[in-house]
Image (spheres, rainbow, N blue to C red):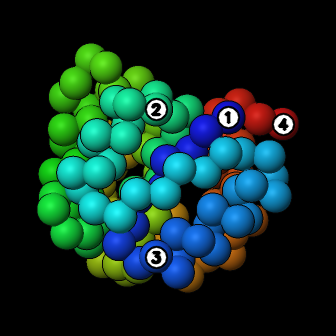
Amino acid sequence: MKALIADDDRVHVRMVSNFLRQKGIEAIPVYDGVQTLMFTRRTSPDLIILDIQMPAGNGFQVLNNLKASSLTAHIPVVVLSGSVDAEDQQRVIQCGADAFVSKSADHEELYKVICRLLGIS
């Protein structure tokens, strides 16, 4: 299993990547919207973990691009964001995200969502 982690906060990406690797999931770190789209097409991840606030294409733009392409529309997307705004949460689901997880949640909660989306027991 491969998960692409898109967030401009390199420390956060490293922490999530290390956690996923401990769970046996290969982590592919990217740090902006353009890299997210490019690496998604290049690496065909099983799942994308996407932040909303990033340079070179925010998470909403990236999500819209991913879901509009037949090459990437099938890939589950978990938005992992520091936003506590209920409108942002609703908007990412309307844009096609499969789940929204707050950055304040522990990694185990994120992993439960990943397992549900990827059918891991």
Q: Nearer the viewer, mark 1 or mark 2?
A: 2
Q: Measured from the top left, where is residue 100 in percent x and y?
A: 45, 59
Query: Is residue 97 left or right of 18 when viewed as pictured?
Result: left
* Residue occupying the point 27% across, 42% down: 37
* Residue occupying the point 46% across, 32% down: 43
Q: Earlier in the sequence, mark 2 or mark 3?
A: 3
Q: Secondary structure at mark 1?
A: loop
Q: Secondary structure at mark 3?
A: helix
Q: Which mark is residue 43?
A: 2
Give the image quarter of residue 38: top left
Q: Earlier in the sequence, mark 4 or mark 1?
A: 1
Question: For mark 4, what is the residue?
Answer: 121
Tell me how far mark 4 sits from mark 1, CA to CA.
Answer: 13 Å
Q: Measured from the top left, where is residue 40 in percent x and y?
A: 38, 37
Mark 3 surroundings within 10 Å by alpha-carbon count, few (fewer than 14), some (14 through 19), many (20 or more): few
Check whether the beta carbons of the residues at disc 4 and disc 2 lie within 8 A of each other.
no
* Residue occupying the point 40% across, 57% down: 30
Tell me how far mark 4 sits from mark 2, CA to CA.
Answer: 24 Å
Q: Is residue 7 above or below residue 38?
A: below
Q: Amino acid at mark 2?
A: Thr
Question: For mark 1, what is the residue?
Answer: 1
Give the image quarter of residue 73: top left
Q: Nearer the viewer, mark 4 or mark 1?
A: 1
Tell me how far mark 2 sits from mark 3, CA to CA.
Answer: 20 Å
Check whether the beta carbons of the residues at disc 4 and disc 3 lie within 8 A of each other.
no
Q: Amino acid at mark 4?
A: Ser
